[in-house]
Image (tube, coloured by chain):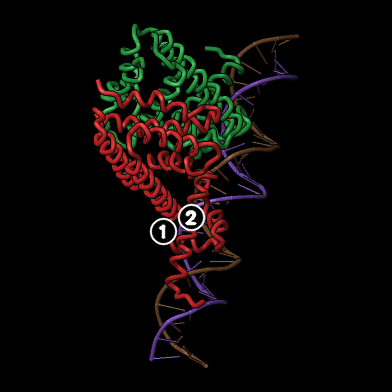
Chain colours: A red, B green, C purple, D brown
Amino acid sequence: MPETSLERGRATRERLLRAAVTLIGEAGWNGVTTRLVAERAGVAPGVVHYHFGSVTELLTAASLGFVHELIGQIGEELTRLPDPEAGLDWLMGAVAVYAGDDPASLLVAETYLASTRIPELRDRLAELVLAFRRTLARWLAGHGVEDADTVAALLAAAIDGLVLHHRLDPELDVAALAGPVRRLLRKE
Amino acid sequence: MPETSLERGRATRERLLRAAVTLIGEAGWNGVTTRLVAERAGVAPGVVHYHFGSVTELLTAASLGFVHELIGQIGEELTRLPDPEAGLDWLMGAVAVYAGDDPASLLVAETYLASTRIPELRDRLAELVLAFRRTLARWLAGHGVEDADTVAALLAAAIDGLVLHHRLDPELDVAALAGPVRRLLRKE
DNA sequence: GACCGCCTTGGGCGTTTGCCCAAATTCACG
DNA sequence: CGTGAATTTGGGCAAACGCCCAAGGCGGTC
């Protein structure tokens, strides 16, 4: 099947981004090297610096794209659920699944860490997290939860913290934490 | 003042550990190199591999020592406070201070991340975190909180998550989150 | 003062890194 | 069947890496 050069280039760029996403989770942000990501994507090492100005640039684009998609899916799922209690159950269940030996949760954590030393990544990740907190707050407020903003901030932080802790202690029953979390929704 | 060789050696070892602690926060786990930590400690590069088998070994010892001391201090402070409400206020206040451009909070996060790829670090860090959760649970249970274990797990995770989020969004008012957190203590 | 054990020095080894680049490849188009 | 623009190749470069090691202090013991 014929294919223009631009189409091939775009496809290669996508393959590099996908390879970077999985490798950030597997090897860590600083463990992703030019040659490693090229091999995983099935291309020559030189391709990386043809499509991206630097390895950091590739990792930044890949991680931000993944996080953007992830919180978009979560927000979408939440609005679909009838009440906040069901939403919390689903949320904690999702966190429970997202731990273990899953690379996605590691990618998020790696991106957090890397963002403290890469200004542009920091700014753009902060935007995404803020948007997620707003989505969460709107969802909570829509169901009559008081202090929706602060509860949303706490909930968002707890989710990220649980991912870290669950990885450290796989026996931690995350889904069982939905009970105490529900208390956050109660009125004064 | 006279000083035996062993005493000098011990002091150098301590200097290396302290230098490693600050550098993990500043440059990240993978950013700490043999020469960097040696320069910060004011010794020749060769000293590092005289006192420690590898750079990873140095970083492991340094980070575990710091975390051990940190959660020890927190536990001690909590038992000193009269009621859980005051404890939570102090806890959230401490988190608020520990963010910003403080390297200590970053060290903890870096250690979490690194532990996923260094088995021995993982095991020993898991022990420390578990012990901290137990301390927290005992403290909560002692004040009549229901589901002390799950609440402690949630609280411990939220603390770590908040440190990450606060770093990303310095305007986040962590201390103000103490309100919603209090709801966790209420009985069913 | 000679000896000994511990610590320290600073250079050197092989490896890996990010990034570069001339040459080769591919495909739409005249 | 060229021509040209985009993409891909694979080797090469300087720099930095972890780790090693022979040589040189340094203080306590005979």
In screen coordinates, is A110 left or right of C1? left
Quarter of the picture containing the C terminus of chain A is top left
Q: Residue B172: name its quadrant.
A: top left
In screen coordinates, is A185 left or right of A21? left
The residue mark sitting in front, 1 or 2, is 2
Looking at the image, is A42 positioned above or below residue B78? below
Residue A53, numbered circle: 1
In screen coordinates, is D23 left or right of A126? right
| Residue that appears at 56% across and 61% down | A42
Using the rendered image, report if marks 1 and 2 lie on a common chain. yes
Q: Callout 2, which amino acid?
A: Arg
Return the residue nearer the eye: A69 or B116: A69
Q: Residue C25: name its quadrant.
A: bottom right
Extreme-front residue of the structure: A82
Element at label 2: helix
Q: Identify the mark nearer the N-term, 1 or 2.
A: 2
Q: Chain of mark 2?
A: A
**Whole-percent x, y for residue B80 in the image:** 38, 7
**Whole-percent x, y for residue D5 in the image:** 40, 77
| Pointer 2 local density, CA inside 10 Å: few below 14, some 14–19, many at least 20 | some
| Residue that appears at 43% across and 52% down | A62
| Residue that appears at 31% across and 13% down | B85
Looking at the image, is A141 positioned above or below residue A68? above
Q: Callout 1, which amino acid?
A: Gly
Residue that mark 2 sits on: A18
Q: Chain of mark 1?
A: A
**Whole-percent x, y for residue B101 in the image:** 33, 32
Element at label 1: loop
**Whole-percent x, y for residue B109 in the image:** 44, 32
Q: Are marks 1 and 2 in contact (CB under 8 Å)?
A: no
